[in-house]
Each structure stands twice: as structure tokens, then as C-alpha cells.
Amino acid sequence: MGSASRQALAAAVDKLIATKDVTVAVGEQLLTVSRAVDESAQLRGILADPSVVPAEKSRLLGQIFPGLSGTAAGIAGTIVAGRWSDGEELVDGLEQIGIHAIAQGDGHSGVIESELFEFGGVVSREASLELALGNKLADPAGKAAIVQQLIGRKAHAGTVAIVEHLVRSPRGRRIGEMLATAADIVASAGARRIATVTSAAPLTAAQQKRLAAALTKQYGSDIQLHLVTDPAVVGGARVQVGDDVIDGTIASRLADLKLQLAG
């Protein structure tokens, strides 16, 4: 995301945080706006055009989305009033703020975050499901129906809304990548960061506590551990926090040794 878009996104987050009556429904409405803007090149062009005054953009949103609540309309107005690098990044901003709003409306609980991570694990293990949800040619409504069938009655309403949105609007992204990014956004809304820990055997409670404490000290924010067991790593652990990767697995060391021998 370009620097202009990052500034616009930061301003929108500040506006969202300062808004008291944010609900999960407000977040769902913002995600609906995101999909509609993504589907219309003309609308993207107008809303991302810095020469169009913010009041005109807000008026246009009101005409196209008359059912928006006052809260959702105000937040959407702040988003489109920002200076975005291009229309695609505006769509991304609408999506991120929509997901953040869902987390904020739920009181920043870790339930949505955990369910997104768990669903991502299910998708990664089931190739047929990943194909069905990630198929670019499949009917978006059909993919949303699959989500409803799988988690509609089991998961938090916010989780369902986020996953349905993602499968409807993949924008060239893989389903696993989208779910991981959404979980990160939900965590950040609650002032947490996610650390995905992959190890050959499950970590003990004591190991989890020590690792979480070390990562919290390193990153200066609360850390939520998401644990993955994978015998392929042989031993040790791989920890990923955002773009940072700490790979202490034996499998990684063996791969490095092979490269050195080959060289």
C-alpha cells in the first residue's frame, strides 16, 4: 500500500476508534460497500479521484447505498475523503476498516480471531474445500452458501460475515492468505498481535507461556499464540509474527546445510 493510502487508512482507523456506536452490523455494511466499489471501475475511479470533493463523494455513497446506518455512512465518508493511491487500495481500505469495525463491535474479543485461524487450518487441510472457496470462476453466492453450511450456525456472526465477504471478493488472493490477514486485523483491533507457531509436537503450557512472554517483550504488545503441529518440521519451532519469521526448526537447518554442501 502506498504512503498516501497508508495515511488515509490510519485516519480512517482513528475515526473508527473514536466512534462509540460501532456494531458488527456496521462492519458488515462497510464490507458490502467494499464489494460494490470493487465491482464498479467507474465508482472506484470517482471515489479515489482527489479532485472530487469529499462532500460529493459522501453524497454519491448516500445515493448508491441508501440503507447505510448513520454510523456506517460517516465512517465510509471518512474513508473516501482520504487520498488513496488508486481505486484498488481504496477497496482494500474499505475492507480493512470493515473487518476492524466487526472486531470493535464485538468488543475486541479473541473469538473471531481464533475462529478465523481455525477455519484457515481446516481450509489448508482440505484441498477440495480450498479449491471450492478459492475458485475465481465460481459463483460468489454459491461460495458464500458453502460458508453458511460449514460455519453459519457454529461460528460468531462476525466470523461468518468476514469469511463470506472474503470468498465473495477474493481479488486475486488465496483463501488462506485472506483469512490470515483478516485475523491479523482483528487482533490489531484489540491491541494484540498474532504469532503463528509451527512445531513438530504440541508445546507445553509452560513453553507457551515463556514464548508469549518473550514475544510480548520483543514486540511491545500482547501476543496471541496460534499453534500448528506439523511433524515435517522434525524438531524446534517456526514463529511468524506479521512479516517477521524466526525459523529454528531442524528441517530448516538441514535445508540450509544441503545448500551449503551443494555450493
Image: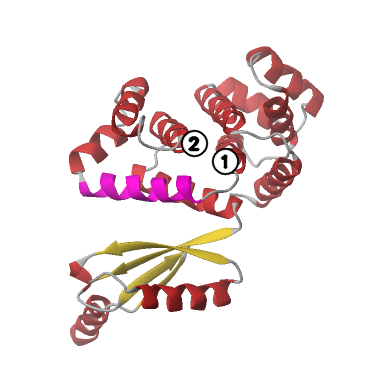
Q: Say whether disc 2 or disc 1 marks the residue closer to the N-terminus.
A: 1
- The residue at the point 20 percent across, 44 percent down is 126
- Residue 113 is a magenta residue: yes
Q: Does residue 53 appear anywhere in the picture?
A: no
The quadrant of the image that shows the C terminus is bottom left
User: Which residue type does callout 2 highlight?
Assistant: Gly
Label 2, label 1: how far apart the Cα atoms are: 8 Å
- Residue 137 is a magenta residue: no
Classify mark 2: residues with Cα within 10 Å, few (<14), some (14-19) or many (20+).
many
Q: Which residue is label 2 attached to?
A: 158
**Left or right for 45, reference 251:** right
**Left or right for 259, reference 117:** left
* Picture coordinates of residue 242, whole percent (x, y): 48, 61
Identify the mark at residue 106; answer none if there is no mark: 1
Q: Quadrant of residue 252?
A: bottom left
Q: What is the magenta range? A: 110-125
Q: Quadrant of residue 96?
A: top right
**Left or right for 26, reference 253:** right
| SS at badge 1 | loop
Q: Does residue 184 appear anywhere in the picture?
A: yes
* Picture coordinates of residue 45, whole percent (x, y): 63, 27
